[in-house]
Amino acid sequence: MSDKVLITCALNGVLTDPKTHPVPYTPEQMAQAAREVQQEGAAMVHIHLRDQETGRLPSWDIELGREVVERIREAAPGILVNMTTGVIGEDISGPLGVLRATQPEVAAMNSGSLNYLKVRRDGQWAWPPMLFDNPVSKVKGYLDVMAEEGIVPECECFDTGIVRSVKMFKQQGLLPEHYTVSLVQGVASGMPAREDLLPILVDELGEGVAWQSIGIGRQEVWGVHRATARLGGNMRTGLEDTFYRLDGSRAESNAQLIKDLVRVAREEGREPMSSDEARAFLGLEMTK
């Protein structure tokens, strides 16, 4: 286990209402948040683009993407950018256009399909049931462009079968030498956020695979973060993942969550990587 840990902040997510939660979505807000989390120990930010009228809906506007990434890199020199690519349906031209235009160091790659479901306390669906479809043909479409552009894939896994599929992608030659795996825990119809599940998932990954936990939820995510640190994984938090700090209070900013995550990492003997250390860890050229 390395004593260094790559800390990522997920700044905003895809649908959280900025009128009720402190999620940044304008280029200025995202740049400021990136600067603040870098000061607290984050070496990378994971970002979603949002429409600029309401901040509620996802956007694949290329000029917006360029402005957001440029402002982040100006405000937080050296920080790595991790761009989302998640989209429902066969048409992935929007995400691919943004990747080519913005040249992030890392990009999320949803590595399998999931029935995306949630039930309210009254027994009603929280939203109409939907399929987050990620067949192999779609995965390959993302990976081909990431390879062309020198972008490191982050294989997002929402269930154990998807974790196991990543090994098959590697066996088939779809994945490059350097890639990472994210164990997404806490989505209602995916893997639960349980620290006792982590050793099983890590064992399924196999030796030598770089991985991190993504904990979606409330206080249960902090136990997962601590177990991740102990098992040698990398760590991520942010307002995309939770609104609750280590002490149970509501988070007012991404920086507060990163401060708490770094505290957990250090209590478990792990020290945050610098941006340069993170680049070397991911096999990135220093000039990218």
Image: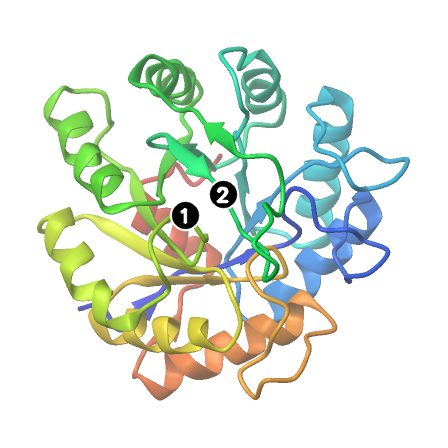
- Residue in the image at 78% along x and 62% along y: 22
Q: Nearer the viewer, residue 128 or 15?
A: 128
Q: Which residue has dot 1 on it?
A: 189
Q: Would you say the residues marked 1 and 2 are in contact, meaning their CB atoms lie under 8 Å apart?
A: yes
Amino acid carrying label 2: it is: Leu
Horizontal and vertical percent position of residue 126: 62, 47
Q: Is residue 35 left or right of residue 171?
A: right
Q: Is residue 142 left or right of residue 180?
A: right
Three-letter amino acid code at disc 1? Ser
Q: Is 10 or 15 nearer to us in this picture? A: 15
Residue 174 at x, y = what percent? 23, 20
Q: Quadrant of the N terminus?
A: bottom left
Q: Nearer the viewer, residue 149 or 118?
A: 118
- Give the side of residue 267 with respect to residue 174, left or right: right
Q: Residue at x 57, y 11 (%)?
A: 93
User: Where 122 sits versus 178, above or below?
Assistant: below
- Rate crowding at label 1 as few (under 14), some (14 to 19) or many (20 or more) other CA atoms within 10 Å: some
Neighbour tally class for label 2: few under 14, some 14-19, many 20 plus, Cα within 10 Å: some
* Residue ID at (59%, 62%): 121
- Where does label 2 land, which residue? 117
Picture disc at residue 76: none
Say which element carries label 1: loop
Q: Position of residue 95 (x, y in %)?
A: 57, 22
- Give the image quarter of residue 55: top right
- Cα distance between the residues tagged 1 and 2: 6 Å
